[in-house]
Amino acid sequence: MAEVKKIAVIAGDGIGPEVVAEAEKVLKKTEEIFGYRFETEHGLFGGIAIDERGTPLPQDTLEMCQKSDAVLLGAVGGPKWDNNPHDLRPETGLLGIRKALGLFSNIRPAVIFDCLKEASTLKPEVLEGTDLIVVRELTGGIYFGEKLRRQGDNGEEAVDTCVYNVKEVERIVRQAFEIARTRSKKLASVDKANVLETSRLWRETVNRIAPDYPDVELEHVLVDNCAMQLLRRPSSFDVIVTENMFGDILSDEAAMLTGSIGMLSSASLGEGSFGLYEPVHGSAPDIAGQGIANPIATILSVALMFRLTFGYHDAAEAIERAVKEVLDAGHRTSDIAKDKSQAISTQQMGELIVSAIRK
C-alpha cells in the first residue's frame, strides 16, 4: 500500500477557494486510479487570515505546513488589504512563509498548448516550440534587503538595499543546472552585470560553477535583453535562472506567452523534496465568486507537486495529458475563450479534466 502523503491545503483569498476545490478533486481521482494516498489539512493564510486571526500567517498554519510533505496554495491578496500596514498585508505572509519553510527557489514552467496559440498576443510562428522554465531565487535580493525612509537634501527619500551572498547564488544556480540536465541542457543566466555589483557576483559564481556541468550549454543574458528576446525568440530558451526581482518580472512576462496567466503552475522549493505549489495568477477579486476562474494552473500545480516532491511521474503525466485532451476538445473558460458565450465554468472545467484522467 502506498505511503500516505500529507498535503497542507491553503485556499486563500479571491478565486483561491474555487480553483483549489477543483485541484482537490484531481487529488481524489489520482488516489482512485493510481492507488496513491493523500491526507489533506486546511489552514488560513493571507487576507482571510488577517480578517479572522489578525495576521496573514497564523502560527498554526505555519506548523501545519511544516508537518506536511507539500503545500497546495490557491492565491492571496486583494485591494481590500492594500492600505493595511506592512505587517498586515497578505504579501508579507507570502514572504514570511517562504523564509520559514526555507523555500529559496521558484520554478515557473511556460508551455505553449498548440490549441491555444491564438490566445496569445504573439504570432503562432514566434511561439512555435516554446517550452521553458524560469528558476527564480526567492529569499534574497531587494525584497529582503534593508528598507528605510529618511530626509535628504531634496526632501524625503527611500532606500531599498539589494544583497546577495555566494551561498545564495550557488544553491539556486546549481538547482537550475540540475533542472537543465533533465531537459534540453541549455541554461540562460540572467543578470545586470554591466551595472549592478550583485549581478557581477552572480555572474562570477555562475562561471565558477559551470565547469561542474560540462553537458549544459551556458548563456549569460542581460535582463533587459532577456525581456526582449522572450518576445522575439521564446523557443530558444530552455531554463532561465535569475535573481528575485528579475525573476518576478520575467516569469510574469513568460506567463503571458501562453495567452493567459490562468494556465501556468509554479513550485517553490527548498533543499529537500518539500515544496509549495501554487498557480502563477493572483486572487482575481474582480471575478471571485462568479465561478468563471480558470482552474488549470492550480491543477497543473498538482501535477508539478507529483513530479517534483513525490516522484509520481505517471500521475503527473496523466493530469497533463487530461488537460491537453480537454483543451484539444475545445473546452475553454472565459479567460481563454474566443467566444465568451461558449465559455464553461470553473467547476465544469475541473470535472472535465478529472473525468479525462486515466492510466
Image (cartoon, helix red, strand yellow):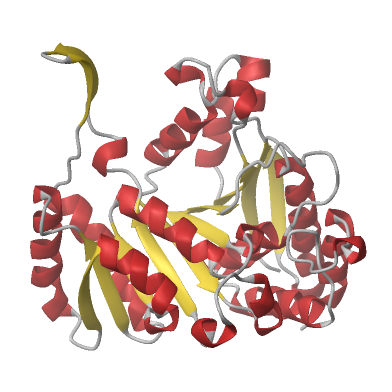
> Above or below — where is 106 with respect to 34?
above
Residue 301 seen = yes
* Viewer-proximal residue among 277 and 256: 256
Q: Is residue 47 above or below residue 122?
A: above
The picture quadrant where one finds residue 135 is: bottom left
For the point 10% across and 59% down, which residue is it? Answer: 194
Q: Position of residue 70 (x, y in %)?
A: 56, 52
In terms of depth relative to the viewer, which is nearer, 21 or 335?
Answer: 335
Say left or right for 321 vs 215.
Answer: right
Seen as rendered, the residue at the extreme front is 154
Please tell me which residue is depicted at 74% across the width and 59% down the height of the picture. Answer: 335
Q: Nearer the viewer, residue 155 or 179?
A: 155
Dividing the image into 4 quarters, which one contains the N terminus? bottom right
Q: Is residue 187 left or right of residue 48?
A: left
Q: Position of residue 5 (x, y in %)?
A: 63, 56
Along the line of sight, the residue nearer the viewer: 355 or 203: 203
Give the answer, above or below, for where 187 lies relative to 128: above
Residue plotted at (45% across, 29% down): 92
Q: Is residue 47 left or right of residue 274?
A: right
Q: Can residue 3 be seen from the camera position used here?
A: no
What residue do we see at 54% from left, 29% from top? Answer: 90
Quarter the C terminus occupies: bottom right
Q: How many marks?
A: 0
